[in-house]
Amino acid sequence: MNKISYARHRFPPDVIRYAVWLYFRFPLSYRDVEDLLAERSIDVSYETVRRWALKFGQSYARKLRRSRPRPDNRWHLDEVFVSINGRRMYLWRAVDSEGEVLDILVQSRRNKKAALKLMRKLLKKQGFIPDVFVTENAGAIVHH
């Protein structure tokens, strides 16, 4: 994997990491990040923060995803009815046994196709098949 290079950047890597972290971690605009850095006597333009976010954001996110622990082998699958703008929608959700949300799918229709879509998406994203699926109606489905 390529190491993140900060060559040809005027600011130290810690400042760049902090600015990008602020932007992605909190609901801030580039100008908000510029202001927060200015309070710490760091003179950076919002355009520079935007460029840093575009250049380094994906790399940081990829690194964080890789360092997260693998989900448990027991997944809970459920569906909930929600109202979005007055329309009845179906929220499909997969959670591991430790409460970590693995994936969410919101659809206007409730059918087998929607459930299969969530499962395909989830299995592709996680890269492994858990030992047990727990659903509301079927109870536990054991996979060996």
Image (spheres, helix red, strand yellow):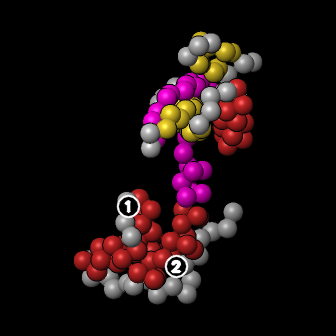
- Which residue corresponds to the image point at 33% horizontal and 72% vertical from the top-left? 32
Q: In this view, does 34 lie above or below 139?
A: below
From the image, tell me which residue sits under label 2: 51
Amino acid type at image mark 1: Pro
Q: Is mark 2 on a helix, strand or loop?
A: helix
Residue bearing mark 1: 27
At label 2, the amino acid type is Arg
Element marked by disc 1: loop
Q: Could you tell me which residue is drawn at 54 percent across and 62 percent down?
A: 60
Q: In the shown orientation, is residue 67 left or right of residue 48?
A: right
- The quadrant of the picture occupied by the C terminus is top right
Residue at (52% x, 79% y) in the render: 51
Q: Magenta stretch?
A: 61-84
Locate residue 99, reporting x and y percent.
47, 30
Q: Quadrant of residue 108?
A: top right
Q: Are marks 2 and 1 in contact (CB under 8 Å)?
A: no
